[in-house]
Amino acid sequence: MIRDLYSQAINGLMSSDEWIIRQDHYDPKTNLQYESLFCLANGYMGTRGAHEEGTRVSIPCTYINGVFDKSETFMRELANMPNWLGIKLYIDKQLLSVDECEILEFSRALDIKKSILFKRIRLRDEYGRETLIEGLRFVSRYNIHLGAIKLYVTPINYNGILEVENIIDGSVVNFCDAPRFKVKHTALVENGSLLDDGEYIEVKTRDFGMHIGTGCKIKLFNDEGENLINNRQYGSFGEQAIEFVDCPVEEGKTIQIHKLTSFYTGRDVCEEKIKDAVLNDLSQFNYKSINEELDRHTKIYDAMWNDADIQINGDTELNRAIRFNIYHLMSTASEQDDRINIGAKLLHGEEYGGHAFWDTELFMLPFFTYVFPNTASNLVKYRYHLLDAARKNAQENGFLGAKYPWESADTGEEECPDWTIMPDGSCYPCYVAKYEHHVTADVAFGAYNYYQITNDMDYLLQYGAEIILETARFWSSRFEYNHESNRYEIFDVTGPDEWHEPVDNNCYTNYMAKWNIQVGLSLIKMLKSEHPQEYRRITAKISLHDKELELWQKVKEHVYLPKGKDGTLFEQFEGYFDLTEAIIEEYNEKDMPVRPQILKSVRLSETQLIKQADVVMLMYLLGSEFDKETQRVNYDYYEKRTMHGSSLSPSIYAIMGLRVGRTAMAYRYLRRAAFIDLLDLQKNTREGIHAANAGGVWKTVVFGFAGISINKENQLCIDPEMPPQWKEVIFKIHFHGSQLQIQVNCENEVSVELLSGKGIDIIINGKSLRVE
């Protein structure tokens, strides 16, 4: 057991091995990867897993969800908050650090069951003095403004004076290791002490002047809780607040260092009360405080895992990886704030600036809707709050209705930059925001799918209907009528495969646009007959009239839907089949595609190689519209040509592989998705966890192998296809207000238990069953 490596003070807090993600040796080259893997988040803030004492290779970041800034950058991005982790330990001016000392023991362990980061490090300095440092860190899920660190420091073979620096570092920047992109998003407002002890830094964002206050206190105790501090002094060093304390230490005797930190922003309280809120959190800090907060924190995680856990009997390693992805996903979303979303790298790294993409609606939202519907409600309401910005975006681009941005932050404006800067300083235009319009249909799909799963009519009437109708209106204006062919087409567009842009009549986009208009028309019909008062209110609000609806109907009936010559194999876009033939023939040791040799002589965009699931993604989303043979033909064709340059892709090929009878391939794709970050398969985990992939992992288990789906009558269906490695899988979902526990065995036999809510009719392996 991993916990047996730790002393008794830590051992009793740790979960069993199946819940532990461990780093068992120190290598500076992997620092940034582990900072992402070991990031702690609580829906409000996220802090990367940097070492408290600091290391030469590090990107220490704390982000508060919703606090964005632009300054000199191309886009508004999550602003790096003051680094609260700093605790430096010295013996006779010798810094006790993994970079400065010989490492005799090293272990860090992320407990995903309790959301605690543990460590055990034994160091030998240049004078032969050995020090054992153990500890834990968490950001509280109970009081989301709090972060806490507890260290146990034991001199192994010496006596002396331990000097401690307690640091809040407000000098942090975004992209600290990228000179070309480095930017400072905050300006110092205050750097001072907190009454008798502790320190406080207040900053404000440079664009909108959002104030953020960070305060902390540090205390040193023996095992009986007695104060050990001899001296204490505060110093302000530019944008750093450093509090110095010291105490005597004796050979073999352990001291405890407790640090409690509080964050508040102008989003939480009015600007004048930020410091008072921080003080209030820290005012009662004593020997028991961190333990009491940790207990409240872990109880919340117990409850969260009670709903979110997937138990797989027979595949322990994969089960831990699946839980790892669930953990980071559920730790980042907020159940309290409906004006924030989930960034493509969660709160775990700088890439994509914390922006929301289509990733949320199609990859993450299903997990939250089935598992944490209250959180899902916040995510879909976020899009409603930014609907006016989407309307403005459509108008500015010459369209009607609402056009959602490819990248969204807090204002709803398009945050995707127009230019990309290369390492040599040259620039080339970035066309994603200009052409990748399918995100608008994806947002509508997420809103409608949320309604289907929850049966939340209040949401549909108050929020969802307006989103669906305004996005349908956008598509009616985005299509262009071809008089010669009597069809509506979309020119200059980019589908999910971003390696070919722009193209004409991308299959995914055309189908999803038609779906959006069709659902809009169906919704109008339902509102008119069942909710006439709401029908009149909504249509009056958005000035939607029958003449415009006639155009929608005409567009829907004459949309051009690309297919191949035989009508079964779909052409991804016009001209795709004319590109240079290229298929994937090799995979590396991590089961990732190897670039075909043809790319040495032919440009990628001139070949049939694609970045990620495109046509196959369409058939996943709108599966009921395509027969099994059509799905199989397209899967087999595009699977050989998909390089999975996006982490969004493997989970879709896993689920679709099951639908078309490629079970062994589906299992390979699930493993690839589950270990993308743990094994750094995309070579960019340093930039944060792949959020959409995390949602895709859950979907692959639940929608894929367990076979959960919704039929055209909006009934829950279960049609599993278990891999031979699994003896049993158990999980819970919510559907139409009821919570169910579902258990599938190796024979694909299903048992369902109603945990809460009303009885429900479901379809299991094609047979109707009433669950009460």
Image (cartoon, helix red, strand yellow):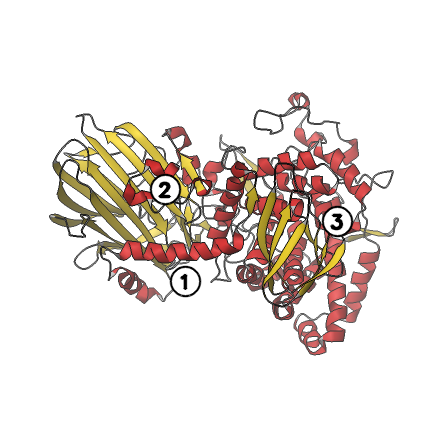
Separation of disc 1 and disc 2 at Cα? 23 Å
Separation of disc 1 and disc 3 at Cα? 42 Å
Label 3 sits on a secondary structure element that is helix
- Residue at the location (24% across, 62% down)? 283
Q: Earlier in the sequence, mark 1 or mark 3?
A: 1
Q: Is residue 77 above or below residue 447?
A: above
Q: Which residue is mark 1?
A: 267
- Residue at the location (30% across, 54% down)? 291
Q: Which residue is mark 3?
A: 623
Q: Is residue 488 left or right of residue 320?
A: right
Q: Position of residue 147 (x, y in %)?
A: 33, 52
Q: Position of residue 762 (x, y in %)?
A: 70, 59
- Residue at the location (83% across, 39% down)? 564
Please say if the residues under marks 2 and 3 sit with CB atoms less than 8 Å apart: no
**Kind of residue indicated by mark 2:** Pro
Please say if the residues under marks 1 and 3 sit with CB atoms less than 8 Å apart: no
* Residue 455 vs residue 268, the one in the foreground: 455
- Local crowd size for mark 1, using a 10 Å CA cut-off: few (<14), some (14–19), many (≥20): some
- Local crowd size for mark 3, using a 10 Å CA cut-off: few (<14), some (14–19), many (≥20): some
**Kind of residue indicated by mark 1:** Arg
* Residue 525 vs residue 146, the one in the foreground: 146
Q: Quadrant of the C terminus?
A: bottom right
Quadrant in the rendering for residue 398? bottom right
**Kind of residue indicated by mark 3:** Gly
* Residue 1 vs residue 485, the one in the foreground: 1
Q: Which residue is mark 2?
A: 60
Q: Position of residue 315 (x, y in %)?
A: 56, 38
Q: Is residue 347 left or right of residue 672?
A: left
Separation of disc 2 and disc 3 at Cα? 43 Å
Q: Quadrant of the N terminus?
A: top left
